Image (tube, helix red, strand yellow):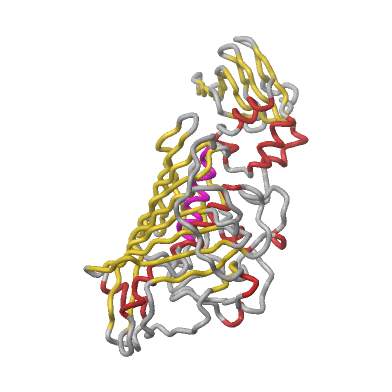
């Protein structure tokens, strides 16, 4: 059987989509083709070992569950293409081919490939993960549900950082599509503040699937309420037209600029995090390296242009999975974004506040989020208590890799002693 056809099939098996793409490729190398005629036993109750995990390529199987003699009924299950089963999971029940059947069987000795360290990495340990990979690693609950948490040390304010919602939701969506279909756009809505102390359940709706395209809706749920949702679109790569109008600004290289550990209004780095560089199951070091182009130090009360540019990249080395790099790009896109629309209106005695409402992104080219990217942000307008910001990220070659836009509520608060988060939340 053609290896590309095997990879094509395995990528559409829902139970495998949660795995790193490298694991799916390895599974493709080890599966064995099994053929059965209608009426054949794939394996029998209390029979010999079934040999491994069976993925149904073509056909239908029946699993019959017998009840005690006092109950003459039985329960019958039917599995079809893209379903999978093992003898142990069938509880020793008979599995019979109802039609001509073709399965791909992964021998038990390779079963570890079904249990990777994370959704992104099959072999890497926690100590070697890049911090942002740790942040965007979710626990699969089933094929359409994932659990994320807010790690200590990760960017956040009093509430869940918006980029975390986007990055984790996109991770969940990416783990429900064929790994050859890559995220190309999404539109997100922030509904309620996220609680940093409560796990986030990401529920994925498989809205649409065709050969080259897929659409997913993801709801982020806390305390049984939807606090955030997005619609994401995926596209299998193909040859096409190529042009680019925007030109990357001529700026100093990041190596010539001073680092900044925490440039974010409301996304802060505490002192004890500066020295800690080791991830734990509940803690992650600050995940970003940032080189702002403007060396001036501003306060929240300093009037300045409605624009900013800075170099950024993920700390550490990320796996080669492009899906992860795009999730990281979304994660970083919310750093110092809607706040730019406040810059022309800052002054002493007035504490500006901002709350994100919606955020859209388009991914144009592949990129590595662990290599330097230039993020160029401006705010063309603010009106009626809403600010509008837009951003473009370029790689060091000057190629435009993504575009972003965000709208948020922006207000002035004449009380510099009040908490920006508490005051803003009470006004919404």
In this rendering, the count of numbered labels is 0
Q: Position of residue 414 (x, y in %)?
A: 27, 86
Q: Main secondary structure of the magenta part?
A: helix
Residue 353 in magenta? no
Report whether residue 225 is seen. no
Indicate left or right for 105 with 203 as reference: right
Indicate left or right for 92 with 162 as reference: right
Q: Which residue is at the far top?
A: 38
Residue 171 in magenta? yes
Camera-side residue: 169 or 34? 169
Q: Position of residue 307 (x, y in %)?
A: 41, 71
The N terminus: image quadrant? top right
Q: Position of residue 274 (x, y in %)?
A: 62, 79
Q: Which residue is at the far left?
A: 384
Residue 311 placement: quadrant: bottom right
Q: Which residue is at the far right?
A: 109
What segment carries the magenta color?
Answer: 164-177
Report whether residue 308 is seen. yes
Camera-side residue: 67 or 378? 378
Camera-side residue: 322 or 284? 322
The C terminus: image quadrant? bottom left
Residue 358 placement: quadrant: bottom left
Q: Residue at x 26, y 73 (%)?
A: 427
Q: Residue at x 32, y 72 (%)?
A: 425
Q: Position of residue 147 (x, y in %)?
A: 51, 53
């Amino acid at each position: 059987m053609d290896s590309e056809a095997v990879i094509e099939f395995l990528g559409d098996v829902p139970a495998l989509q949660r795995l790193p793409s490298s694991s799916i490729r390895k599974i493709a190398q080890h599966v064995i083709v099994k053929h059965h005629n209608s009426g054949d036993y794939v394996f029998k109750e209390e029979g010999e070992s079934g040999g491994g995990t069976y993925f149904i390529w073509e056909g239908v199987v029946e699993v019959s569950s017998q009840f005690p003699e006092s109950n003459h009924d039985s329960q019958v299950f039917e599995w079809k293409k893209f379903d999978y089963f093992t003898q142990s999971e069938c509880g020793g029940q008979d599995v019979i081919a109802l039609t001509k059947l073709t399965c791909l069987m992964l021998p038990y000795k390779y079963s570890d490939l079904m249990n990777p360290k994370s959704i992104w990495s099959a072999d890497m340990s926690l100590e070697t993960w890049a911090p942002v990979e740790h942040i965007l690693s979710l626990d699969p609950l089933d094929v359409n549900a994932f659990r994320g948490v807010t790690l200590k040390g990760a960017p956040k304010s009093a509430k869940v950082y918006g980029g975390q919602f986007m990055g984790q939701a996109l991770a969940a969506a990416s783990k429900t599509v064929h790994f050859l279909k890559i995220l190309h756009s999404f539109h997100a809505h922030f509904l309620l503040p996220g609680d940093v102390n409560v796990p986030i359940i990401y529920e994925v709706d498989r809205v649409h699937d065709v050969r080259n395209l897929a659409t997913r809706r993801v709801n982020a749920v806390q305390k049984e309420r939807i606090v955030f949702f997005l619609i994401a679109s995926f596209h299998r790569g193909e040859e096409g037209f190529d042009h680019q109008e925007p030109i990357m600004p001529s700026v100093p290289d990041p190596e010539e600029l001073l680092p900044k550990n925490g440039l974010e209004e409301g996304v802060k780095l505490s002192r004890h995090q500066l020295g800690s560089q080791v991830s734990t199951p509940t803690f992650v070091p600050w995940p970003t390296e940032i080189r702002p182009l403007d060396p001036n130090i501003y306060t929240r009360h300093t009037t300045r242009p409605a624009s900013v540019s800075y170099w950024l990249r993920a700390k550490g080395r990320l796996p080669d999975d492009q899906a992860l790099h795009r999730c990281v790009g979304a994660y970083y896109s919310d750093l110092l974004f809607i706040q730019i629309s406040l810059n022309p209106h800052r002054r002493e005695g007035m504490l500006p506040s901002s709350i994100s409402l919606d955020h859209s992104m388009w991914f144009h080219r592949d990129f590595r989020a662990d290599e330097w990217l230039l993020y160029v942000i401006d705010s063309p307008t603010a009106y009626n208590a809403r600010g509008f910001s837009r951003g473009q990220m370029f790689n060091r070659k000057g190629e435009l890799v993504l575009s972003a836009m965000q709208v948020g509520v922006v207000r002035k608060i004449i009380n510099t002693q009040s908490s920006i988060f508490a005051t803003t939340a009470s006004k919404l």
